Image (cartoon, grey):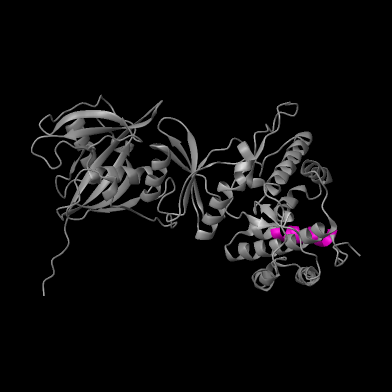
C-alpha cells in the first residue's frame, strides 16, 4: 500500500534588527499586488529556489532582492523555527534569522510586491500584520527556539490576539521561554497596565512560581507573577488586599489579579534584596532596626487573637521531613529534633497575628548603599513576596530571619530595638522548635531537588541550634 509522504514548503524570514534609544527596531514591509496577505505587514522573506540552495544562502539572496541590503553569511544568526499552518490548511516550515550587521540602506526593491517599508519598534508592532509573522516575532522575543502556529479554518490571516495560535515548544532544559509568559498572561498584564515593551524573568531559582519585571511602552515598571498553585495565589492576593496595604511604600500594591491564571500584577518597590548585600556594620544595624520596625508593623496590622486549637508547631510533618533528610543529618541531629518535638507538646499556645511567612533577607529590600559608610540618608526597607502569608504566631516571621543574625548579637539587639520589645520565654522556645523543623524541611527539599546549598544551610542551622540550646526546655519555655 502506498503512503502519501508529508511534504511542505520551507521559507526563510529576515529579522533585520537595529538598536535605538527607544528600543530595538525591526524592518517590516507591507505586502502588495497579487500576493497572499496583500495589505498586511510582514518580514522580508521568501522561499528556497531549489534543492541546490541552503537556507542561509536563500536568506542573503532574498534580503538583497527585497531590500537591497547586503548581508554576509557569517553575520546570519538562527533565531527561531516555526511550523505553521494557514487557515486554508496548507503548512510550511519557517526559518527565522536575526541579522544585526549589513551593508547599504534598506529600501523597496520590488515595488510590485511591496508598497511600504518601515523600521518599527519590536515592542510596538503595527497592524494589520500577518498572524504567522506576528506569532514568530513573539516567539523570538520570548527566547524560544521552536514554535508551532497551526491556524484553524476561519481564523483571520491578520493577527488577532483573540485567535492567537502560538505554542512555544520547550527546549532541552524544559523551558518554553526565559523572557516572557504565555499569551494569556501577557494579555492579562497588558489589560492592567497597557502595552508592555520589555519582560525580564526575575524568578527565584528555587521557587516554581514565576516572576517578571516589566516595563510599559509609556514608562512605568511593574512585576507580573504566576503562582505555582492556588494556595500560594490565594494567600498572596489576600495579604496584598488586606494587611499589606497598611505598610504603605514598604510593600508592593496589587494592580490586578486573575484567579484562573493564578497571576498578579504588582507595583515595583525601590531597593534591592538584602541577600548577598555587604553593608558597613553601622549601616547593618540601622537596617536591622528598620526590619524590626517593619515586622512590628506587620504584626500590628490587626489585633492579636487566641490561637486556634491544635495550632502548635508543625510536628505532624516532622516524621516525613526527617525521613527525607536523614541521609544528610549529622549524628545526634534527629534525636535533637525529636526531643524538641516532644517538648513542644507542653509549650503554651501563642497569640496569632498577621505574618509574612517567608520573612528572610531575599524578600527584604533596602536602598542602602553598601559603599557609603558615612551616608546619612534615611534607611528604607520594604518587603515582597506574600505567597506564604497567613495568620500565625509572631515568631513565625523570625524563623528564617534568625539565620541572618547568627553570631551577631548586635544585629539581633538592633532588630529588637525596632520591634519594640523582647521575646517572651514561650516565644523563644517556639522559635527554637520552628527553626529546627524548618531546617529539616529545607534539608529534605534540597536533597530531593538536588540543591546542595539548601541542604548545607539546614545542616548549619541545626548545628547552631544544638550548640545554643543544649539544655532541655521547660514547659514554660525556660531553659533548665
Residue 402 position, x and y percent, is 75, 52
Q: Look at the image and give the residue range highlighted in magenta.
A: 458-468
Foreground of the two, 43 or 286 = 286
Residue 290 position, x and y percent, is 73, 39
Which residue sits at x=66%, y=44%?
275
Q: Residue furthest right?
A: 480
Among the 4 quarters of the image, the one containing residue 347:
bottom right
Foreground of the two, 446 or 196 = 196
Q: Is residue 68 visible?
A: no
Q: Is residue 469 visible?
A: yes
Residue 335 position, x and y percent, is 78, 72
> Is 176 on the left or on the right of 162, as rendered?
right
Quadrant where the N terminus is found in the figure? bottom left
Most prominent secondary structure in the magenta stretch? helix
Which residue sits at x=77%, y=58%?
431
Q: Is residue 228 magenta?
A: no
> Is 52 on the left or on the right of 215, as rendered?
left
Q: Residue furthest left?
A: 34
> Is 352 on the left or on the right of 479, as rendered?
left
Foreground of the two, 126 or 96 = 126
Q: Height in image: 427 above or below 283?
A: below
Which residue sits at x=76%, y=61%?
462
Amino acid at each position: 500500500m502506498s503512503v502519501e509522504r508529508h511534504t511542505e514548503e520551507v521559507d526563510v524570514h529576515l529579522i533585520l534588527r537595529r538598536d535605538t534609544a527607544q528600543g530595538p527596531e525591526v524592518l517590516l514591509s507591507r505586502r502588495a499586488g497579487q500576493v497572499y496577505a496583500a495589505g498586511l505587514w510582514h518580514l522580508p522573506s521568501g522561499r528556497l529556489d531549489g534543492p541546490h540552495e541552503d537556507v542561509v544562502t536563500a536568506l542573503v539572496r532574498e534580503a538583497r532582492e527585497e531590500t537591497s541590503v547586503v548581508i554576509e553569511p557569517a553575520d546570519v544568526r538562527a533565531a527561531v523555527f516555526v511550523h505553521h499552518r494557514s487557515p486554508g490548511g496548507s503548512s510550511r516550515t519557517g526559518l527565522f534569522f536575526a541579522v544585526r550587521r549589513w551593508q547599504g540602506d534598506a529600501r523597496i526593491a520590488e515595488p510590485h510586491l511591496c508598497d511600504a517599508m518601515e523600521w518599527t519598534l519590536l515592542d510596538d508592532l503595527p497592524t494589520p500584520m500577518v498572524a504567522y509573522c506576528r506569532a514568530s516575532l513573539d516567539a523570538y522575543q520570548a527566547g524560544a527556539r521552536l514554535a508551532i502556529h497551526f491556524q484553524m479554518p476561519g481564523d483571520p490571516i491578520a493577527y488577532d490576539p483573540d485567535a492567537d495560535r502560538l505554542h512555544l515548544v520547550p527546549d532541552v532544559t524544559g523551558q518554553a521561554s526565559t523572557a516572557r509568559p504565555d499569551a494569556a498572561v501577557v494579555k492579562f498584564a497588558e489589560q492592567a497596565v497597557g502595552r508592555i515593551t520589555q519582560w525580564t524573568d526575575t524568578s527565584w531559582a528555587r521557587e516554581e512560581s514565576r516572576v517578571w519585571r516589566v516595563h510599559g511602552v509609556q514608562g512605568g515598571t511593574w512585576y507580573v507573577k504566576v503562582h505555582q498553585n492556588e494556595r500560594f495565589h490565594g494567600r498572596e492576593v489576600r495579604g496584598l488586599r488586606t494587611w499589606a496595604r497598611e505598610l504603605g511604600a514598604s510593600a508592593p500594591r496589587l494592580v490586578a489579579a486573575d484567579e484562573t491564571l493564578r497571576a498578579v500584577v504588582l507595583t515595583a518597590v525601590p531597593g534591592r534584596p538584602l541577600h548577598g548585600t555587604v553593608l558597613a556594620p553601622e549601616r547593618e544595624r540601622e537596617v536591622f532596626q528598620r526590619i524590626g520596625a517593619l515586622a512590628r508593623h506587620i504584626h500590628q496590622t490587626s489585633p492579636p487573637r487566641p490561637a486556634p486549637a491544635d495550632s502548635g508547631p508543625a510536628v505532624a510533618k516532622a516524621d516525613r521531613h526527617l525521613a527525607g533528610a536523614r541521609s544528610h543529618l549529622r549524628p545526634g541531629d534527629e534525636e535533637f529534633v525529636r526531643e524538641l518535638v516532644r517538648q513542644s507538646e507542653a509549650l503554651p499556645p501563642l497569640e496569632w497575628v498577621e505574618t509574612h511567612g517567608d520573612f528572610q533577607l531575599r524578600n527584604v529590600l533596602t536602598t542602602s548603599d553598601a559603599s557609603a559608610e558615612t551616608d546619612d540618608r534615611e534607611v528604607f526597607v520594604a518587603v515582597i513576596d506574600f505567597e506564604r502569608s497567613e495568620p500565625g504566631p509572631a515568631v513565625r516571621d523570625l524563623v528564617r530571619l534568625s539565620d541572618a543574625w547568627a553570631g551577631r548579637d548586635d544585629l539581633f539587639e538592633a532588630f529588637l530595638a525596632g520591634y519594640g520589645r523582647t521575646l517572651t520565654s514561650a516565644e523563644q522556645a517556639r522559635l527554637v522548635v520552628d527553626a529546627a523543623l524548618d531546617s529539616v524541611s529545607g534539608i529534605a527539599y534540597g536533597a530531593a531537588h538536588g540543591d546542595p546549598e539548601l541542604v548545607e544551610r539546614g545542616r548549619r542551622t541545626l548545628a547552631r541550634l544544638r550548640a545554643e540550646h543544649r539544655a532541655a526546655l521547660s514547659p514554660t519555655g525556660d531553659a533548665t
